[in-house]
Image: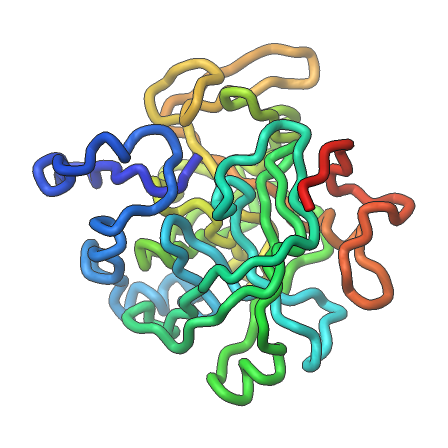
Amino acid sequence: MKSVRLPAFGALSFVSLFASFSAQAFSMPLGNEAAEALLGRFPSPPSHAEIEAANVDFSAIVALNNCSGALVRYTSSQPDDKALVLTNGHCYEGGFLEPGQVVADKASSRTFRILTSDGRGTVVTLRAERVVYATMTDTDLALYRVAKTYGQIEKEHDVTALTLSSEHPVAATPIRIVSGYWRRIYSCSVSGFIPELREGDWIFRDSLKFQQPGCETIGGTSGSPIVDANTREVIGVNNTGNEDGERCTMNNPCEVDAKGKVTVEKGASYGQETYQIYSCLNADNDIDLAKPGCKLPRPARVRN
């Protein structure tokens, strides 16, 4: 999973730079101060020409201390609704959630830095009020509610949230994965959908697979929104990839098809869909896990 593990960037090695805290670089840790000190400085953000070519910029993109994220809204969101931030469940500040576990409506004071459109600065730092929903069961997503409304953020900071698509993604859709942590935009398309993706103790269902080359995501890109390059709507959230070619181990997810056949593809990267959130929304735009037809996991273990 793609929280910060301080990976190498091709020929650019971080080995000597991060040797002093290499013990923290394994598995999927929370962020660390040394990596945070590099945020926005190495590697450099894309040029304006590269951003124009991507047709997507860093507007509403969030940098967390260990992951990426985005300020998002529903199609039904109103200006006086408290704003939401989307990231991965495995980026939750309380640590990885066990299989079958959910965080629902829990107090939080986590901070989120909203980037400038060119990714070279911070527009505002927002503070969370609640974790609306977080899980690593079947999917890997977390939604936070911040203290300010959409209207306040737009009026005071000229930032408009990205809209979550209410439709299931479509194969071959051109996408952009926008990382607030590394100030990096990946460009590719949706390769297809994986019925079951296994990684360690976790199972993700109907996962997005990214076409390569183009979207070879790295540690720190966890939680990055997967943006439809045509509509600029968010269709999912980036979460993991197979780094070493191992089979179904941590940081090495494997694909399982409808017949149970297991496939491993070293270098493959994946994301989780977000359209199913809409099936759980009530009239107040709150997530109601008891709503008939709700497609978000509703396991017995709910951490309040």
Q: Is residue 238 visible?
A: no
Q: Residue furthest right?
A: 292
Residue at the location (72% across, 67% down)?
Answer: 75
Q: Is residue 297 visible?
A: yes
Residue 250 at x, y percent in the picture: 43, 23
For the N terminus, the image quarter is top left
Is the residue 203 above or below the residue 180 in the image?
above
Residue 290 at x, y percent in the picture: 86, 46
Q: Quadrant of residue 3?
A: top left
Residue at the location (34% across, 42% down)?
Answer: 4
Front position in the image: 43 or 82: 82
Q: Residue furthest bottom?
A: 155
Is the residue 299 above or below the residue 235 in the image?
above
Residue at the location (61% across, 30% down)?
Answer: 204
Residue 297 at x, y percent in the picture: 74, 37
Residue 182 at x, y percent in the picture: 31, 54
Is the residue 57 above or below the residue 188 in the image?
below
Q: Decide if residue 128 is on the left or right side of residue 36.
A: right
Front position in the image: 86 or 148: 148
Front position in the image: 184 or 17: 17
| Colour treatment of the image | rainbow
Residue at the location (38% across, 43% down)?
Answer: 30
Front position in the image: 111 or 212: 111
Q: How many marks overall? A: 0
Q: Residue furthest left?
A: 16
Q: Quadrant of residue 293?
A: top right
